[in-house]
Image (cartoon, rainbow, N blue to C red):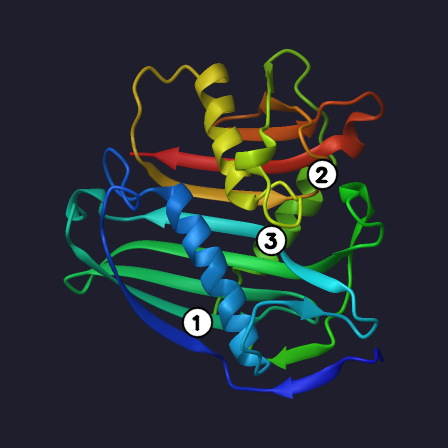
Amino acid sequence: MTNAAIARTPSHQRQNVVTLGMAQLAPKGISEDWWLKYLGDVHWQLIADAVGQNTTVFRDAQGRQLYAAFCATEFKQLLPDLVGLGQEVKVQSALWAVGRSRIQSNHRLLVNNQEVAQFRLVSTFVAHLKAGVNASVRRTTPYLIPVLAPAPDDFAQIASAQAKATKKGAMNAINQVTLPTYFGTDFNAVGLLYFPSFTRLFEQAEVALADRVTWSPVRHRRVLYFGNIEAGETVVGAGGAGNCFELWKNCDGPAASGMLAHCSLTRF
């Protein structure tokens, strides 16, 4: 048993209303990038609420700062034609437990009581063991642990099983592209490649590697996250089977050790 304290709480829920402007919308449907950033913050805030904190700064028993690192995310867009400038979106969010060390948030977006999109985010806590070195990031236990009801779905379990199988694969040696990252826009306040930046990189990889001629909205995207990079490093985007793409560390060594993330998607 760790030195963590137990914060006994019910599953936390929140409901917000967001008025759609340019930032929240894509050319058709909603902006996946904006909503990942917004709901990532909601995820953190729900965890803070669950342990009785006023801020989203988490620490372990030794006082080290922790971060809620995402293991898997899923975006489903149901009715992209129903969203437009000036409309109000009701955002229903709930926080759940998935196992001993992971937390899941589910988010439903509704316009005029019709569900237009869903997001599911699964996170664990990590810390830098060596300041400023992302290769030193490891999972750890927060001092305060929320005790939540179990998730009402098996998304986290399915994503975990898929992650274990996916990490055994090798990089596509032919269908690949090198992608730059930018410290000021792709990395977050603690120097980690921000999880929405993975989606941006997957978009770039898809444009470079797929046979898609014109853009169309995402119907479904699932991203599995395996690692991170140091500030300013490039990554390699690789085309997998079907509508699947991978991001790899752009470095020498065994390919299996360098996979950063896996994405599967479908479009309208």
Q: Upstream in the sequence, badge 1 or badge 3?
A: 3
Q: Examine the rendering and report whether any part of residue 149 can be seen.
A: no
Residue 45 position, x and y percent, is 50, 69
* 267 is higher (above) or lower (below) than 62: above
Task: State if disc 2 and disc 1 touch (CB < 8 Å).
Answer: no
* Tag in front: 1 or 2: 1
The 10 Å Cα crowd at callout 2, few under 14, some 14 to 19, many 20 or more, is some
Residue 203 position, x and y percent, is 46, 28
Q: Residue at x 74, y 36 (%)?
A: 168
Q: Which residue is mark 3?
A: 70
The numbered dot on residue 94 is 1
Say which quadrant the N terminus sits in. Answer: bottom right
* 201 is higher (above) or lower (below) than 17: above
* 195 is higher (above) or lower (below) than 265: below
User: Residue 22 vs residue 151: left or right?
Assistant: left
Amino acid identity at mark 1 = Ala
Say which quadrant the C terminus sits in. Answer: top left
Task: State if disc 2 and disc 3 touch (CB < 8 Å).
Answer: no
In the image shown, does 189 or 96 lie closer to the viewer?
Answer: 189
In the image shown, does 4 or 65 lie closer to the viewer?
Answer: 65
Q: Which residue is mark 2?
A: 167
Q: Secondary structure at mark 1?
A: strand
In the image shown, does 106 or 162 lie closer to the viewer?
Answer: 106
Distance from disc 1 to disc 2, alpha carbons, whole Å, reads: 30 Å
The 10 Å Cα crowd at callout 3, few under 14, some 14 to 19, many 20 or more, is many
User: Residue 34 vs residue 112: left or right?
Assistant: right
Q: Residue at x 41, y 42 (%)?
A: 33
